[in-house]
Image: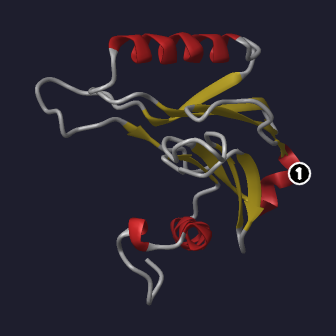
Amino acid sequence: MMPGLSDDLQMIDDKRKTAVIDAELTRLQVDIAALQETRLANDGSLQEQQYTFFWKGKAQDERREYGVGFAVKTSLLPMIEPPTDGTERLLSLRLNSRNGPVNFVAVYAPTLNSSPEAKDQFYSELDRFIGQLPQTEDIYLLGDFNARVGTDHDAGLHVLVTTV
């Protein structure tokens, strides 16, 4: 964490959270990271020192919950197609790499406590979302799938790609 800032991200002003994340991703030498529970309204982008943030959340007048996004090393911006469509639970980003296009999908799945209907709707939307991507291109699913293994309900599945 940055000196002088709280270890609890909930205690940091929304406008400063991207600066904290920027510093941590720089320290960890991450190129692209998927973000979940951004809780930012609408969609947008913001450039910090080393990273540019893209997000999709609920409308301004709705409850601030969910939200997904990406933090992309700013030096990679000429290689990406910024997100243009998505939901507060699904967002994709396309990277034009030396080996061809690569699609990243940021995912924030409903929790174990969500209704079966909400889970079914999400996974149908994920299927449709992935189905719209070209089958000849690589796809990386990144995020919080709220997966549970066995009876350990405290363990979740989290995926992060750290290099391009």
Q: Residue 81 vs residue 128: left or right?
A: right
Q: Residue furthest bottom?
A: 4
Residue shown at the point (77%, 38%) measured from the top left: 83
- The x, y position of residue 45, in whole percent, is 76, 54
Asked whether the viewer can see residue 164, the reply is no
For disc 1, the neighbor class at 10 Å (few under 14, some 14 to 19, many from 20) is few
Residues 119 and 60: in front is: 60
- Asked if residue 10 is positioned above or below residue 112 in the image, the reply reads below
Q: Is residue 3 visible?
A: yes
Please provide percent x and percent y for residue 159: 44, 39
Q: Position of residue 10 (x, y in %)?
A: 40, 65
The residue shown at (45%, 88%) is 3
Corner quadrant of residue 115:
top left
Q: Nearer the viewer, residue 100 or 110?
A: 110
Q: Is residue 121 above or below residue 164?
A: above
Q: Residue furthest front?
A: 61
Instruction: Find residue 63 and report its horizontal and vertical position in percent.
Output: 52, 44
Spot the residue most to the right: 78
Amino acid type at image mark 1: Pro
Q: Secondary structure at mark 1?
A: helix
Which residue is at the far left? 151
Give left or right: position of 7 versus 45. left
Write down the residue under mark 1.
Answer: 78
Q: Nearer the viewer, residue 41 or 111?
A: 41
User: Where is residue 147, by image quadrant?
Assistant: top left
